[in-house]
């Protein structure tokens, strides 16, 4: 009776909340108050797939859902991105019958990396994908080793781990375990022998802290590593990116499936690979997955094309306080061989909490923009001075850089008869301030 | 002039390296030739040949590893500080200068013992905040961010009084340490970059004369904006 009542309340609240345009955590929060162990009292489907990690969770989950649903599976997933226990509770109860049976083939959960340990106390995932661990919102999350410990507490016996073999810290979760499924990339044409990054989070072995060596870097500290002392090393992968051509925008998985990329970034190919891995495990054929991922455009609003007067551009939503997210976007712009202008906006560091911290700007590799493909750089927002100082420590000529504290004035400046494509790189907290001034798709 | 960035590849969690970049630039702008040495584990530095030493923030694990290596500098660092030369330790690196650090499992690690404070870590919550700190040797306060998991008790060599944000521990209004021209603070990241007046102060100590500061236009403007934002925040709470 308690289960029935709790689910009913959650469904009603969610229904009203949706009409009012509210988020999806409150119904779950109230349900957990009414019945704290509600999640362990509902009947869950055969597949419970969880995805966590610093970057790419939302995109990966969206892709997995897209493939599975396209292939006739019924999927319950948290597409609103409420990824703490309350949001997951709303998701589960809203997908359940009033007698407490989840009506889907697959429950797909994007989980916040710090709160997974609470969520998975009640819901044991059958499959658990961990994408990567980066310096991400350190002001809120803590550093990667801190987050590693939090995720570690969320891993229980009976869960199949699916890990990114190319991330040395993530791979620690599977070190010494036999039944891990690894995904990753072979040496790629876009790889570098030397690290391209301001800092090196792969300098020391995460297991024994001796120096590590890399035979190849995909980006930052993601690549093929091995410890010089304890034997810790990148594992062979079962699901593999066998080649990529970012200029042409094509990737190949497992030596046979070619996928055209709507977004020519290394991030995107890892997200596609994670989705491919999960869909393969669920039993979808490689051909079908490749067809579903071919030219797939994310619907989560992270990549938005726009028109500004006669000019065209793309906004690459990146995360403030997350240098690798910025580095990835900068790589995309730097590789634009027809030449482009790039705009950065740092106006509100976060939309969820207040901070004035800009130390993360020093971890971003802006030097990559010192490249003939980049014509002008426009810096805007309240923290434009901090951006200007950061750029003054690159070798980028200062006459390429324009500064505007006002985002409106920066947009007016860009609304010119210049022909270059425009990349706008900023965060959720600031993107609306730009998109409100242009015609977005 | 010679600057030493110690443990540059492992104690560099919040862009701390930029403190060295800022100092290098102000010294160069003031007409000096500047060499920066970046050293780490296993290296042996002759501290006496440097004009400035910097160590930044690291993870709790890495701090303990570094502490083990760092002890070899106890005597030479003591002599360096007593000679009046400058050093800056940001984030949890300055904890190594105290008496003991006790980790979340209760294991205790001896520090260098330059100061009498003790550190007690926990592994449940990150203690983070934007901060405004005042120092008696600076006309305007410092701004920045603190990100730690330990409480510091028994600190009698306080450098800052806390106007906003986290202090050494719950019952303290003070933060950081100063001894001669050794500065230690839990301010993470590029504290000298973000606080151009602090940079100027440190540079003057190193140079023994007024440094060139006319170029610090955006640095000063950025500082003012952050101070305004944080002051607004402080008055709201």
Image (cartoon, grey):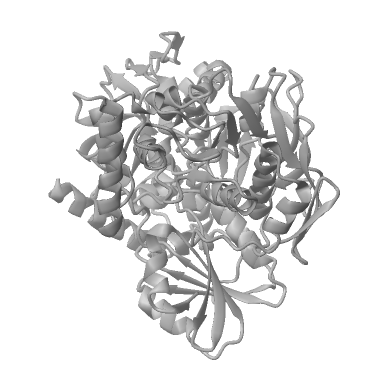
Q: Residue furthest bottom?
A: A417
Residue name at image x 45 percent, y 61 percent: A387
B135 or A105, nearer to the observer: A105
Q: How many numbered discs sit on the rendered protein?
A: 0
Describe residue B216's horizontal placement relative to residue A34 as left or right. right
Q: Is residue A15 left or right of residue A84?
A: left
Q: Tell me which residue sits at (49%, 88%) in the image.
A: A309
Within the image, what quadrant is residue B214 found in?
bottom left
Where is residue B59? Give x, y as percent: 49, 28
- As drawn, the residue found furthest toward the top would be B107
Depicted B93 relative to depicted A229: above or below: below
Residue A370 in view, yes or no: no
- Determine whether B129 is above or below A256 in the image: above
Q: Position of residue A71 (x, y in %)?
A: 65, 51
| Quadrant holding the N terminus of chain A | top left
**A390 relative to A279 in the view: left or right:** left
Q: Give percent across and percent down for residue A342.
A: 55, 71
Q: Position of residue A65 (x, y in %)?
A: 57, 49
- Dividing the picture into quadrants, the one containing residue A6 is top left
Q: Is residue A256 visible?
A: yes
At horizontal 69% and vertical 26% (from top left) the residue drawn is A180
In the figure, is residue B9 to the left or right of B159? right
Write the residue at 36% across / 32% down: A99
**Residue lying farthest right?**
A255
């Amino acid at each position: 009776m308690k289960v029935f009542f709790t689910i009913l309340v959650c469904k009603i609240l969610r229904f009203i909340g949706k009409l009012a345009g509210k988020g999806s955590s409150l119904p779950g929060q109230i349900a957990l108050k009414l019945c704290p162990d509600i999640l362990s009292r509902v009947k869950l489907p055969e597949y419970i797939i969880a995805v966590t990690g610093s970057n790419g969770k939302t995109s990966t989950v969206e892709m997995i859902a897209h493939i599975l649903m396209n292939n006739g599976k019924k999927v319950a997933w948290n597409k609103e991105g409420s990824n703490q226990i309350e949001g997951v509770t709303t998701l589960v109860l809203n997908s359940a019958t009033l007698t407490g049976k989840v009506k889907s083939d697959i429950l797909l959960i994007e989980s916040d990396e710090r709160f997974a340990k609470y969520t998975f106390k009640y819901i044991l995932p059958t499959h658990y994908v961990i994408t990567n661990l980066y310096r991400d919102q350190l002001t809120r999350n803590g550093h990667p080793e801190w987050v590693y410990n939090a995720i570690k507490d969320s891993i229980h016996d009976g869960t199949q781990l699916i890990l990114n073999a190319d991330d040395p810290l993530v791979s620690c979760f599977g070190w010494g375990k036999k039944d891990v499924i690894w995904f990753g990339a072979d040496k790629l044409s876009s790889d570098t022998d030397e690290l391209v990054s301001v800092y090196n989070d792969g300098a020391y072995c995460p297991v024994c802290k001796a120096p590590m060596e890399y035979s190849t870097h995909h980006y930052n500290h993601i690549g093929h590593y091995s410890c010089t002392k304890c034997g810790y090393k990148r594992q062979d992968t079962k699901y593999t990116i066998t080649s990529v051509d970012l200029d042409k925008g094509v990737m190949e998985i497992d030596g046979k499936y070619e996928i055209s990329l709507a977004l020519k970034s290394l991030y995107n190919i890892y997200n596609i690979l994670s989705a491919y891995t999960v869909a393969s495990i669920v039993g979808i054929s490689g051909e079908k997955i490749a067809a579903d991922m071919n030219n797939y455009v994310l619907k989560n609003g992270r990549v938005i094309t726009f028109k500004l007067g006669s000019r065209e551009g793309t906004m690459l939503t990146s995360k403030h306080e997350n240098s690798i997210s910025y580095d990835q976007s900068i790589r995309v712009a730097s590789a634009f061989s027809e030449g482009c202008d790039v705009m950065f906006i740092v106006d509100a560091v976060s939309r969820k909490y207040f901070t004035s911290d800009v130390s993360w700007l020093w971890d971003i590799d802006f030097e990559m923009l010192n490249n003939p493909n980049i014509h002008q750089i426009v810096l805007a927002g309240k923290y434009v001075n901090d951006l200007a100082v950061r750029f003054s420590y690159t070798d980028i000529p200062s006459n390429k850089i324009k500064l505007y504290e006002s985002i409106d004035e920066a947009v007016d400046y860009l609304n010119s008869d210049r022909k270059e494509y425009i990349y706008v790189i900023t965060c959720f907290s600031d993107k609306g301030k730009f998109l409100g001034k242009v015609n977005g798709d | 002039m010679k600057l030493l960035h110690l443990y540059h590849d492992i104690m560099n969690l919040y862009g701390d390296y930029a403190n060295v970049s800022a100092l290098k630039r102000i010294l160069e702008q003031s007409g000096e030739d500047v060499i920066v040495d970046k050293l780490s584990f296993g290296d042996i530095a002759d501290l006496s040949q440097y004009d400035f030493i910097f160590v930044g923030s690291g993870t709790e694990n890495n701090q303990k590893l570094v502490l083990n290596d760092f002890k070899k500098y106890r005597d030479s660092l003591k002599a360096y500080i007593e000679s009046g030369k400058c050093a800056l330790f940001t984030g949890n690196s300055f904890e190594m200068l105290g008496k003991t650090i006790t980790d979340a499992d209760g294991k205790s690690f001896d520090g260098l013992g330059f100061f009498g404070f003790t550190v007690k870590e926990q592994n449940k919550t990150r203690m983070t905040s934007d901060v405004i700190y005042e120092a008696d040797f600076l006309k305007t306060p410092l701004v920045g961010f603190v990100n730690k998991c330990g409480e510091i008790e028994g600190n009698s060599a306080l450098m800052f009084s806390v106007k906003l944000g986290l202090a050494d521990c719950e019952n303290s209004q003070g933060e950081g340490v100063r001894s001669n021209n050794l500065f230690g603070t839990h301010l993470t990241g590029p504290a000298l970059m973000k606080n151009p007046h602090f940079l100027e102060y440190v540079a003057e100590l190193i140079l023994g004369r007024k440094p060139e500061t006319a170029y610090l236009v955006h640095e000063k403007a950025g500082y003012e904006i952050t101070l305004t934002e944080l002051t607004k925040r402080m008055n709201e709470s």
